[in-house]
Structures are given as C-alpha cells and as structure tokens.
Amino acid sequence: MFKQQLQILAILLTFVFNTSNLFSSHLMGGVPTYRFLGETSPGSGEFLYEINFSIYLNCDATSLVDTIQAIEVNIYQNGIGNFNPLFLGLELQPIDSVPYEAQTTSDCTVGQDVCINEGIFRDTIILDGFSQSGTPVAGYHIIYNNCCRNGNIDNISDPGGAGMGFYSYIPGPALTPNSAPIFTNSVAPFLCIQDSINFSFNAFDPDGDSLVYSLFTPLEEPTSTGSNLSLPIPTVDFLPGYTETNPFGTGSQLEINSGTGISEIFIPNQGAYVFGIEVKEYRDGVYISSTFLDIQVNTVVCPPNEYPEAANNIGDTIIYEFEVIAGENICFPMIFTDADKDSLEIVINGELFDSGLTPNPAILSDTVLDSGFVSVNFCWETICENGQDLPYFYYVDVIDNGCPNKSTPIVYKVNVIPFRLNPSFPGICVGDTANLQVGYAESVTWSPDYNISSLTDFNPQVWPDSSSNYAVTGIDSNGCIDSDTVLAVVFPFQETYASNDTSLCKGDPANVSVAGGVSYVWSPSDYLDGNPTLDTYVINPDETVNYSITINDSYGCKHFDEILVEVFELPVASIEYDLIYACDSVAVNLKNESTNTVNQNWFINNDLFTAQKDFSYGIDYADSISVRLVTLNGNNCADNTSVFIKSLSREEFFDIEIPNVITPNDDGFNDSFLPIINSAFLECGTFIKIYNRWGKEIFSSEETGSLHWDGKGNNGNELEIGTYYYVLRLDEQRSQGSITLLR
C-alpha cells in the first residue's frame, strides 16, 4: 500500500552535481541535506559534516536509466560578491535506491504506469572554520546541476532543455554550527485531478530551529561553475498563466501554511508540473539558512474516493495543539475515520518518538482497527529534560486502501513547558532598593550574599552599590531544577543642576533654572505662568518663595533640589519741605520722611547733591528746582520720589496788607499804622515816611524791623485829623498810598 503524497526536495547547501547527463530528461526532483558532526578535534578549526542527497528519477517504461550512478558535488567557500572560489569537489556514491509505485490491484489500476525511483547518496566532508588569515569563514555554498528536466512538463518553457539546479548554504562552522531540516514525507507517484487535498511538506530541525515554509521558483543550472560560483542562480521560466504561487494554472490552488508546511492543493487538469518549497531556518529570531525543495508532480484521472479524517476534526483544522508542564504526563487518543469504510493505516513521524533525539520519548499504544476506523493513544511521561521553549511536532498520515489510496496529513503540536525561573529586575537608581523577581518555584536559593534581604525568599530586596549579577537556583513541584542569573542594574548617576538661591527686591525679575534631566516638576507653581514643567523661568515674585524641584533623568531616576527666591520689601520714599524767604534769597528746607530706609541720595535738577538725611538748599525769588530722593534699605532695595518746588517772586511775597485808617485813641483798635508783613523781612532794610497833603514829610523812621506810625510827627506831637500819604520800603520793594487819621 502506498504510504504518502509527494514530497518536495530542495537544498540548503551549495553543492554542484554533474552526472554527464546520465539522468537527462528523467529528473523529477531532489533534496540535499547536511548534518553537523562537530569539530574533528578540539581547537583544530576543522569541522565534520555528513552530506545527504536524494534525487528522484522517472523509472516508467520510457526511462532510459537502469541504475543510479555516482554524482559530483561542488562546494564553494562564501566570498565577496560573485567571487565564491571552489573549495571542494566531491563524488557522491549511491548507498540505496527506493522505488515508489502505485499499489495497483485487479480492481484498481489507477497510476499503474507511474514509477519514481529515489537515489540516496551520503558521505562525510571536512570544512574549514577559518580562512588562512584567521578570520571565521562566513559559509559554504553547495550546488548540484544537471540537464535536463522531463520534456512533458506543462508549466515551464522548453522543459526538455531546462536544467535543474539544487542549492543549499552551510553557515560558517565556527560561527553557526547547523544541521539542515529533514523532511518527513516520501514522494507520491501521482495526484488526482479535480481533488482537493491537504498535503504535508513538513520537516523537523535537529537543532530545534524555527521553520517557516513558503513557495519558490525552481532553479535552473548555474550560469557558471568550475573554479568560481556566480550568484544568484537563475530560475526556470514559467509559461503564461503559471507563476511561482500558481504553478498549476487557471482554476487551481496551492496554499502553504507557513508554520507547518501543510498545503492545500487543487489541480483541475491532467499533466506534469514543477514547483518549489523554501524552508527558512530561524534561531533566536535570526535567519540562518534556507532549504529549497524542487519537485515534479504528475496528475491522473481517479475514481471517487473520500479522504480519511480525524474524528474530532473542526472545520478545516488539521493542526492539533497540546500542552504539558515538563515532568508531568499527557495522554490523548487520536481517532480517524473513513466515510467509504476503507481500512486505514497510520504513519507517524516525529523526533519526540526517537530516543536518540528525545530523552524518555513519547509512546503510542492501544491501536484499534475497524472498518473505516482506527485509533491510537499518544502518551508521554515527560521528564524535566523534555522541557523546551520550542514546541515538538509530530506528523500523522492516515492512509486508506481505496482506489487510489488517499491520505490525510495531520500535524500535532506538543508544548512541553520547561521549568524556567526567568529572574528579572526592574533596575534601580543609585541609593534605591528593589526586589528581584522569579516565576513559580517550590524553593529558591540566591547568591551572592551581597546587599540582599534574604537568600531564600522568592523576591528578595536588594540594594547593590553598582550593577551586580545575582545567581538563583530553584526547584519546582516536579523536581525540575533551573539555574539562572539576573543583572541587577544600578543606573549610573546623572548630574543634575539647579541655579543658586537668589534674593531680590520686590518688583525685580529673577532667573531660575534646572538642567540635566528630561522632565521637571516645580512646586509650588506660583509665578510659573501655570506650567510648572519647564527648565527655565523668569519670575517676578511678590513674596519669598522656596521652590522644590523634582528632576527626572533619562533612566527615570528622580533627583530633588531646591531654589530659594527671597523677596525684600522696598523702602517707601517720602519728601517733606518748606520755603524760608530771606532778604536776598529763599531757603528750601528738605526732609527725608521715608520709611524702611537706611541711606539716601538727593538729586537736585538730576544732579547728585547730597547723601544727608535732611538739608537746606537756597534758591532765588521766582526760581524753581526739581528734587528727587532715592532711598535704600538694608537689603539695598531702592525707592524714589520727586517734587517740583517753585519760590514766590518778590512782588508776590511782598503783598503787604496796609490799613487805610488809624484811630490812635489807645482803645486797642487801629491805634497805629502797622502794615501786615512777614516779620522776617523787617530786617531787610526798611523805612516809612508820612507826608501831609501838601507833600511835607511829617514823619520818618528807618529803624530796622519797624514800620510803625502812631499818628505823631517826628517831634512827638499828635497830628491833626486828616488824610496823609505814606511811602514804605522793604529791601528793594517800595509801596505807597494814603491813610486817614481820625481821633
């Protein structure tokens, strides 16, 4: 009974195979793989690889090839650009030959004329890890090429003249030891037209690398080989209506699951088609290499036959996922049925069943077979060593014995969750503390005993002075042990700055600033224009304010600083003055009546005059001055005030009130002629003269300080009643008029 569908074959090494056209017009595909075996001896810099290659040949009645013969492989060292020098030429001998033919009976002859023969080649080689200059070799290219493909291929130009190139790449042995993925399926002699199938191109990776599946255009022969390899390798030319992602033409389907390699295929027409699958390897998220699978598929007309399916199938789901914690057990049944009641066979492949690859591997048990029914139990008593971050995959093909045989691929994904402490630390600022963190464990032990609150707590507090490594070993409830280290990062101290404390007089501006951080918060926010998050301000405070600033640096560490802005009250400048009129000038008496002041400066007509507190300043009659007082208090704060002072003219000042009648009868009223005048001016040279109506002087007095006349003449005799005339002189000011004497 035929066991599976077609398998893609392509290469991830740079081998070149030349067979002198021994297989010309009969090549149907091929796949090289390689396995890293380690360094030949410690420190030798030479690394051993096992090279495996499979080629698929047409072996039907039209084939001219009776036996599979040796092939030649060229290995090139990765160079620069198109310079990739030949490193090794290798002749690979066949070690086995496996025919794939349809299982025909008298009742079913579908595909009886189809025959495919697999030639298997293997050898070991030694690759240099370092160049002659001592630098690590980047990698090696492996190329196989031959002419020609089969002439009956329907989707490429000139198929009988189109060559086949199989390419793979080995990453540098000293840099990235790597083994290529291994494909789990064999080839299928044919596929049925008008049949929707799920076909598995899955592989497993010996290194546990992540695999990503996609379609690619099959390769032609390299444009040049021999002593140098030119890249890239050319590809075949698809005929119109066919493409890399649509190699079967109009109305067909080929979609591949990038995570599993399972493809949905529908081919409407009978014929022969070539296409390719690329499998990319990723290690810790970094691309390593690709394996390219090149295959020819033949399609035939088949009678109706339903595909087997999983009894618990949900829609088109063909991937089942399970999870178990390392050290615990998992068991579940796999049940499959066939609607046609055909007998079923199960083919199961996966590394988790191989004790050479998986310690304490899983087992299959309790197989039950019935008409159109098969079941088998999957059980795995996992141990701690089975835990890993990548899932395990195993692949199930359920094959019926219908006409023709139909198989359904199923992917099972088993996640064995490893015990991981996964210690972590958030990072701290200088002088701070924080807790080390681990996942679940039954018990833990920390080391070293350095600035740590406990060596056995799950999340101890630590306060290292500088970034320090802490080691932790823990055990879970299944007895699994994990050890790990965590770096307790202490962020480097970043200098921050704040402007100095300052003092100012009320009303003056002040510059305050901080620097060295990435964000700031000021408190209080007074005088900061409603935005306390800037680094620089010009403020005009009315009162003393003490700012507390939180400075956040680039690590998120907080720094604290303060800026005191002390505001001093101003003095209040005030001037008092009076005018003292003298005979020849006017004295201005100025007084500083300011409050909260200790010093002052007086300015007369904008010129500094004196720093005395009080002083007198002389001006002329009918003169004026501008006086400005600048006062200073003990904090050197200033205030000022100004006055404008103007003196009277002599005419204005000597505006004398003179009586016009006197009655010298000693009754105390109007007994004498006494002009009302500022007494200060009586000392300025005065006289009074009285004349009768005939102009005769009858009284005169030049007594300083006296302008008095009591109605008597110079001889002391009382004068008659009547009208008299006076002449007064005050300094340079004269006044005259008449006065009536009554008794």
Image (spheres, rainbow, N blue to C red):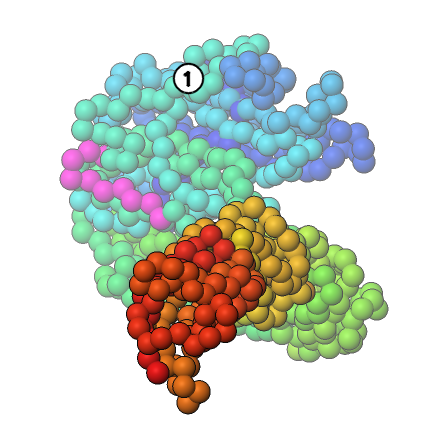
Query: SS of the residue at dot 1?
Result: loop
Q: How busy is the neighbourhood of tag 1: few (under 14 within 10 Å), some, or many (20 plus)? A: many
Identify the residue shown where x is 84% and y is 68%.
449
From this view, report whether residue 509 is shown above or below residue 94: below
Is 95 drawn above or below residue 660 in the view shown?
A: above
Residue at mark 1: 221
Residue lying at 52% horizontally and 35% vertically, measured from the top left: 289
Residue range (magenta) = 248-257
Classified by dominant secondary structure, the portion drawn in magenta counts as loop
Quarter of the rendering occupied by the C terminus: bottom left
Residue at the bottom extreme?
667
Is 31 rendered above or below residue 367? above
**Near-viewer residue (64 or 161):** 161
Mark 1: amino acid = Glu
Q: Position of residue 592 (x, y in %)?
A: 59, 65
Residue 513 position in % (x across, y down)? 58, 54
Q: Is residue 250 magenta?
A: yes
Considering only vertical position in the picture, is 376 above or below 254?
below
- Using the image as rendered, state which of residue 13 and residue 113 is in the foreground: 13
Question: Can residue 94 be seen here?
Answer: yes
Give the percent coordinates (x, y) of residue 530: 42, 64
Asked whether, in this view, residue 698 is left or right of residue 35, the answer is: left
**Residue 436 found in image quarter:** bottom right
Q: How far from the left and from the top, in percent, is residue 332?
A: 46, 72
Task: Identify the residue at image location x=60%, y=59%.
Answer: 616
